[in-house]
Image (cartoon, rainbow, N blue to C red):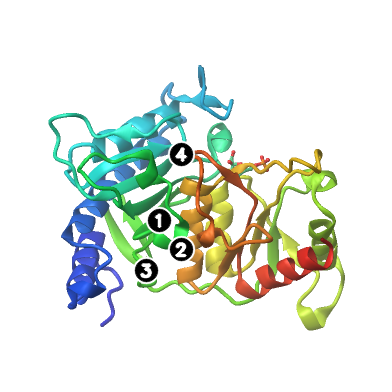
């Protein structure tokens, strides 16, 4: 059945109905309601992001988040909108956000559910004032501890245990892309009716791309294997489609989304200035793991260079990891360069 053009609510309910055997269900109807609440919040954020240049919502709030990054007003707005849209739905037992140091409990008096929502409310925020595409990333797990109150332990689950993951990209149009483990689908917001319409059904990424995304300004801090891999991509060899083109926006969701649709590899390797303590930048729980779930469902791959992102058991809420993600053949070639240059 061609679903193209149906709105997201109907799509989500149809997907729910397809799961005839309850034993198949990694989710119940509650996830449907959770996803609906998420789509509502993303419409509100989209409206503000798209008019941000017109009202005094840009600029800094003068506060810093746990990572020492200045928090722009739109970050706070998105964080607040997501929290308020999700806190009372009765689907969640706890939340965690890039903008909040600790886990976010569901307020007393509100019904608790069995899901956990981890999110980066507005990734790429350093691009807000330049009007480059930015995005919201979310990851959903099922509660695994007893009782109705969600705990830090419920948040620290590995990527392969996610029940759903997705992102909203606020760009030339606003798109919501998500998976519940049964493929990846993309919905474009029709602002004239305020509905997300299915525009990219069953997204599959290319097994091998023609472009790479990396901040080469950091290349002096990369390990040998990474440097050799990037040099390899720049060599001329038409039989392997090289040289690759460099495409880098500096906004994870925008760079990931382009590579998902067109094929390619995104790299944010660790900084080896201190070889004994390599430093990563991107966060595992609400950036790397949800995007890894999506890319694997689309036929791609995500690694730190040594281990599969989806296999990492988190130890901290804001844990950071190197992230190399995209077309499977490209990621496998990168891993080969790393293992050959240990
Ligand atoms: P750099 C944005 O600040 C972000 O967290 C990601 O969205 C993006 O991929 C990365 O940082 C860009 O980092 O060091 O290249 O500016």
Pointer 1 and pointer 2: residues touching (CB < 8 Å)?
yes
Task: Assign a secondary structure to mark 4.
Answer: strand
Query: Which of the 4 image quarters holds residue 340?
Result: bottom right
Answer few, some or many: residues within 10 Å of disc 3's Cα (few below 14, many 20 plus, some between 14 and 19). some
Asked if 78 appears above or below 207 in the picture, the reply is above
Q: Which residue is mark 1?
A: 166
Residue found at x 50% / y 40%: 316
**Ligand 1 contact, mark 1 (Cβ < 8 Å):** no
Q: Which residue is mark 2?
A: 294
Mark toward the viewer: 3 or 1: 3
Report how far apart the C-alphas of labels 2 and 3 lie in the structure: 8 Å
- Nearer to us in this view, 35 or 242: 35
Q: Which residue is mark 3?
A: 181
Report how far apart the C-alphas of labels 3 and 4 lie in the structure: 24 Å
Q: Position of residue 177 (x, y in %)?
A: 40, 59
Residue found at x 19% / y 77%: 21
Q: Position of residue 292 (x, y in %)?
A: 51, 60
Q: Which residue is mark 4?
A: 122
For marks 2 and 3, the one nearer the N-term is: 3
């Amino acid at each position: 059945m061609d679903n193209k053009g149906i709105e997201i609510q109907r799509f989500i309910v149809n997907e729910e109905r397809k799961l005839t055997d309850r034993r198949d269900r990694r989710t119940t109807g509650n996830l449907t309601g959770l996803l609906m609440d998420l789509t509502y919040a993303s419409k509100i954020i989209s409206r503000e992001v798209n008019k941000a240049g017109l009202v005094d919502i840009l600029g800094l709030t003068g506060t810093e988040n746990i990572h020492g990054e200045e928090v722009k007003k739109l970050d706070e707005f998105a964080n607040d909108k997501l929290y308020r849209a999700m806190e009372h739905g009765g689907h969640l037992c706890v939340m965690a956000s890039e903008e909040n140091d600790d886990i976010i409990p569901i307020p007393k008096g509100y019904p608790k559910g069995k899901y956990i929502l981890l999110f980066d409310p507005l990734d790429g925020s350093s691009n807000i004032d330049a009007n480059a595409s930015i995005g919201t990333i979310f990851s959903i797990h099922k509660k695994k501890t007893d009782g109705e109150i969600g705990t830090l332990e419920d948040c620290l689950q590995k990527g392969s245990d996610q029940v759903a993951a997705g992102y909203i990209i606020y760009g030339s149009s606003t798109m919501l892309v998500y998976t519940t483990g049964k493929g990846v689908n993309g919905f474009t917001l029709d602002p004239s009716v305020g509905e997300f319409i299915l525009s990219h059904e069953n997204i599959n990424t290319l097994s091998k791309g023609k472009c790479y995304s990396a901040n080469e300004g950091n290349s002096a801090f990369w390990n040998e294997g990474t440097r050799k891999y990037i040099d390899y991509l720049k060599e001329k060899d038409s039989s392997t489609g090289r040289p690759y083109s460099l495409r880098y926006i500096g906004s994870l969701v925008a760079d990931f989304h382009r590579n998902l649709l067109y094929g390619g590899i995104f790299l944010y390797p660790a900084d080896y200035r201190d070889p004994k303590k390599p430093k990563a930048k991107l966060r595992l729980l609400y950036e790397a793991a949800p995007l890894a779930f999506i890319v694997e469902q689309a036929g791609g791959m995500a690694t730190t260079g040594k281990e599969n992102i989806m296999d990492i058991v988190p130890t901290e809420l804001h844990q950071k990891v190197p992230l190399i993600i995209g077309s499977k053949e490209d990621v496998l070639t990168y891993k080969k360069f790393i293992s050959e240059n240990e």
